Amino acid sequence: MSLFAYEFMLRALVGALLIGLAAPALGTYLVQRRLALIGDGIGHVALTGVGAGLLLNRSPVLVAVIVAVLGAVAVELIRERGRTSGDMALAVLFYGGIAGGVVLVGLSGRTTNLGAYLFGSLTTTSRADLVTIAVLGLLVLVSMLALRPALFAICHDEEYARVSGLPVRALNLLLAVTTAVTVTIAMRAVGVLLISALMVVPVAAAQQLTRGFRSTMSAAMVIGLASAGAGVWIAGTANTAPGATIVVLAIAVFALLGAAGAVRHRVRRRPAVEPTAPAEPPEVVLHG
């Protein structure tokens, strides 16, 4: 009997594929802006939303989306006004988010669910969760592809984009909100502790092969999609954690492409074979 004949495995596969496409598409912009670890900070804020949802007996995913979006917008506004450094704001999110989440989950009395949100649990994805992942994931994906020229402009040179008349603040807020949404919908796949890996590692792997922004984004989405699909299949076959398996596969692809790139670079730099040195001319005998 096929592994994906089970409905819960089919839901896990569809959810993982959607996240495998959306996360690297967004991650390409975050890597360009040197904000690769912002997913960690927002992920910990989302954990507070999960705790609030469990405590209030509401959908943890939807409450986490709301709380994570508010946190992401706050970080973006703090960064924009320059009252404190971006690193400091992320540190406050990191520690405050995870502390608040653990406290609220403890108050709800449902601590057994905490591991599923920290490390992911795709096989427990319900139909309602899958609908949420599909709708929000497609919105993120369409936004990242449709607004690629404008988003690339603010990621490459924000001042030039502002002078060019682009709505820089609105685009920055869009990136912050889509990051929060991607983190929360990916909780089911890889968990809040591993979500940054799914945003960043496929992009890092793609950069071993490509140089252009568009080609890097396309290659990263392919790697994310393949890692997610293969990860769910291996997890179902070998009974391993789906989220961790997906991340391990993505890292393996990065290592393989990195090794292949190093070999290719060495071959290109190998000096050409020097031509054979001409034979010494025969001794010339001068005659008087």
Image (cartoon, grey):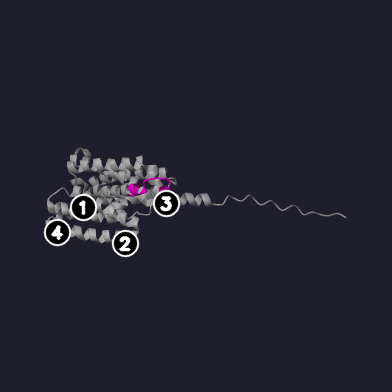
Q: Disc 3, disc 1: CB below 8 Å?
A: no
Report the mark closest to the observer, 4 or 3: 3
Prevalent SS, magenta region: helix
Mark 1: which amino acid?
Tyr
Which of the two labelled residues, at mark 2 and mark 1, occupies the earlier sequence position?
2
> What residue is at 20 percent from the left and 59 percent from the top?
100
* Disc 1 target residue: 117
Label 2 packing within 10 angstroms: few (<14), some (14-19), many (20+)? few
- Helix, strand or loop at disc 1? helix
> What residue is at 37 percent from the left and 48 percent from the top?
168
> What residue is at 18 percent from the left and 59 percent from the top?
102
The image quarter in which residue 20 lies: top left
Question: In the image, is residue 166 part of the stretch drawn in magenta?
Answer: yes
* Disc 2 target residue: 88
Gap between marks 4 and 3 measured at Cα: 45 Å
Question: In the image, is residue 100 part of the stretch drawn in magenta?
Answer: no
Frontmost residue, 144 versus 118: 144
The image quarter in which residue 45 lies: bottom left
Mark 3: which amino acid?
Glu
Give the farthest residue toward the right. Answer: 288
Frontmost residue, 6 versus 172: 172
Report the mark closest to the observer, 2 or 1: 2
* Disc 3 target residue: 159
Percent from the top left, x then y, of residue 130?
Answer: 21, 42
Q: Which mark is residue 281?
A: none
Report the mark closest to the observer, 3 or 2: 3
Mark 4: which amino acid?
Gly
Q: Quadrant of the N terminus?
A: top left
Asked if residue 286 shows in the view, the reply is: yes
Gap between marks 2 and 1 measured at Cα: 25 Å
Label 4 packing within 10 angstroms: few (<14), some (14-19), many (20+)? some
* Disc 4 target residue: 106
